[in-house]
Every structure is written in C-alpha cells, then in structure tokens.
Image (cartoon, grey):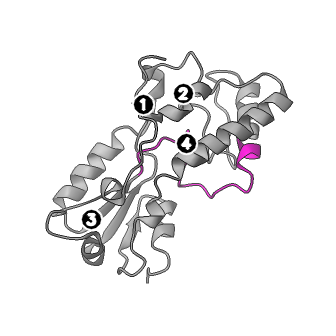
Amino acid sequence: MSDLDLIPAGRTFTADEITVFADSDSRTLDEAIAEADVLVSAPHAGARIPEELVPLLSPALTRRLQYDFTDVATAAIVREWAQRDRRIVAVINPHPRLVRDPNRARPADIAADLTTAIERTRAAGPWQKVDLSGVDAIRPVTFSFFPILAVPGTTPNCSAWCTRSSRSASAVSASTSARETLSPNASSPRSCGSAAASRACRSTTP
C-alpha cells in the first residue's frame, strides 16, 4: 500500500478550499452565490484516502485500484469551469465515497449499514457486481467492485469492526461539510449535479 494517494492525517478543508467561483480575488462567496445561475456540486470528486483510514484498508489495495473507475476527473473539470464562468459556483468534496457520499442521506446506524454493505460484497465475491442500494453512504468497494477494506471474517467481528471503522470515517468526513459552506443568508442559485447541492440551498431556493 506504499503507493497509495493519501490525504495527510489531520488535514481539514476550509470553505475557501472546497468552493470555487470566478474572480475569487475580488468577490466574496456570498456575492458569487447571489450572482450565480447554477450551483454545481461534486460530492465525491476525489479518490485520495485520509491517512487515518490506512489501518483499515486491504493490503491488496494499490493506487491503480484506488483510482479505478472513480470520478477523479470531475474536480479538475468543474474547477476550471467555475473559475471561467461568473454564473457558476462549485462545491467540490475532496473525500472519496469510502469516507462518505454526501449524495446519500446520513444513515440512522452507520455501522449497521456498513456491515450490510460488506456482507453483500463478501457474498458476491471480489470483482463481482453487488447491489449496495440503501447501504452505500460509505462505499466499501471500488467501482470495479474490489473490496477496499480488510474486514474480519465472522459476522460478530465484522459488526464490531464496522462500528470502529464507521466512527473513523465519520470523524474524517466531519472535517468538511459542503452544506455548511453556503451562507444561509445569500440568495440561492439553481442547483446542478446532485441532491447534496439541492439540500445545501433548499431553505432559500424559490
């Protein structure tokens, strides 16, 4: 796993780092939102894994697998678009779906959902397509269905392990919140690209 692309331990992301808009040197975020026509949300635009999660990863995970069928190009495309077009405000989440998918509602029981997702993945077998509907707020496989996490074999051990790992993932994902980035007092543009963007501006959207 020495070649993995990691987010350094303890790294947090500010609102300035995850929001992108044109003329940011002369406009505030509130001004950009007020003038924007479209809010673009990139809820899982990165594949870099927080270093805190390394002890939970499969030893077989490589950088090639880490980036396999991800949305890795999304951030670069959306960032360039937003920097060129004053009508756009973009919110780019740097964390992968392994940490948290902002497009999914927060589970009532994260550990239980993660346990179910892992059990479905295990039943299907490595590299086999598996339906994670309803339990993929934290996604334990790559998009080619390679299991990312190293999980104990028995269900009781898996459940306990998932409780610990889901707490780790939740702590990491709490460091960046796209929903807290947008000012609740600013006029809200139309949203584009995800339910997360809609939720972020629901209170003021006409």
- Of the two numbered discs 4 and 1 on the same chain, state the one appearing first in sequence: 1
> Badge 1 is on which residue?
6
Q: Are marks 2 and 3 in contact (CB under 8 Å)?
A: no
Q: Are marks 4 and 1 in contact (CB under 8 Å)?
A: no
Residue 120 point in image, percent of width and height: 74, 33
Q: Is residue 199 in view from this perspective?
A: yes
- Of the two numbered discs 3 and 1 on the same chain, state the one appearing first in sequence: 1
Q: At 27% across and 46% down in the image, what residue appears?
A: 77
Mark in front: 4 vs 2: 2
User: Which SS class for mark 2?
Assistant: helix
User: Is residue 57 positioned above or below 181 on the image?
Assistant: above
Q: Amino acid at mark 2?
A: Val
Q: Are marks 2 and 1 in contact (CB under 8 Å)?
A: yes
Q: Which mark is residue 54?
A: 2
- Of the two numbered discs 2 and 1 on the same chain, state the one appearing first in sequence: 1
Give the residues in magenta: 93-114
Q: Amino acid at mark 1?
A: Leu
